[in-house]
Amino acid sequence: MIVLEQGDDVASSWWKGYDRLRLNTSSWFSHLPDKRFPRHLGRWISRDDLIRYYRDYADERHLRIHTGVTADRIDRIDGGWRVQTSRGPRDAAFVVVATGRQRAPVIPEWPGLPNFPGPVIHSADYRNANPFDGQRVLVVGTGNSGSDISLDLAGGGAAKVWLSARRPPHLVPREVIHLPHDLLGVTGRRLPRRFVDANARLIRRLTIGNLQDVGLPTPDDGAVTRFEQDGRVPTIDAGEFVQAVRARKVTIVAGVSAFSDGSALLADGAEVQPDAVIAATGYHCGLDSLVGHLGVLDAEGVPLVHGGKDHPSAPRLYFAGFMDPRSGQLRELRLQARRIARAVSRMPTTTVLT
């Protein structure tokens, strides 16, 4: 098996994460196959500890990882697949695409944005608060990255931090009675949606309370309902984010509708004047040029099959890491890896793209 890695090192995508990044799924469920996290790393793994863990995993298993290789297109050939790469074509009987959901950052095309005088970056390019010292910053998006970055800015010297919420997020405490939130996700994945929605609503009321007075009312829909309809996962809070919002260190504002010179115009008619904008507005899988011609993607560019299943029009082509289940993405990725391994275990020539 050969792994093609676009970056210059193992876990290069994690190197790009912001400095305060920690997994918001617990070490109980986020480990790789057959290697749990060392206990001294704690329950919530930091970015740097995760990178070291991945490096150790690759070294211990003598994985054949070719770094600095970009995969451009995958085509059918007799007996398998041909992957066109920056270092020439590679042929394999089986191919696994594991580039993940966060390959292509997306910034909405807000009217007037090109004329905004300050910097506009995606959350993928945020590292720490240092460049924003003394500045007024608008963070757009209340998912896990947006809430984390706004909290980092508020404690890192920004003069003002606004967090733009198109609609109220579902907030979930990171731990409930000392148990990690993803334990509830794993145990509740087969329970009726209405039951899990009601349970999540009760937990929020008991642990977080009503935040309507600071701009974050309890959503009308359920957490699982929203996830199943829109793919939006809850925002996980260790307690610091809610405290910062209550203390007005992070000010919640309405969704952005447009920009006009130095102002951001909001959906409720208000406007703010930020010095910089950070768009925590999600990603696209970015698979169109790679496999879009094979008929294996849905209308949103997400693979139609996952794990050990292959599409009828593309036999022996597998996808891993493109689901975002309520039981945790890294846990699901581990399960998918095992299913794919069983499917290809009798065939030695496999290329994995990361």
Image: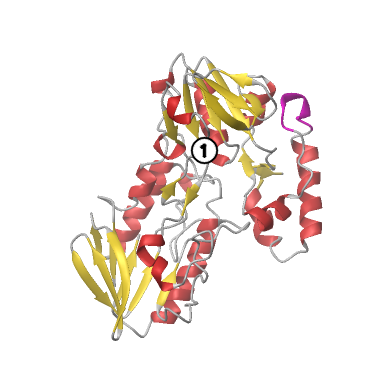
Q: Is residue 189 left or right of residue 24?
A: right
Residue placed at 41% from the left, 52% from the top? 103
Q: Eyeballing the image, is 124 above or below 241?
A: below
Give the quadrant of residue 78: bottom left
Residue placed at 53% from the left, 60% from the top? 331
Residue corresponding to mark 1: 280
Residue 186: x percent and y percent?
A: 65, 60
Residue placed at 45% from the left, 56% from the top? 285
Q: Determine crowd level at label 1: few under 14, some 14-19, many 20+ residues with C-alpha closer than 10 A.
A: many
**Can you see residue 64?**
no
Q: Which residues are magenta?
A: 210-216
Q: Is residue 5 left or right of residue 243?
A: left
What is the quadrant of the N terminus in the image?
bottom left
What residue type is disc 1 on? Ala
Q: Eyeballing the image, is 30 above or below 211?
A: below
Residue 121: x percent and y percent?
A: 42, 33
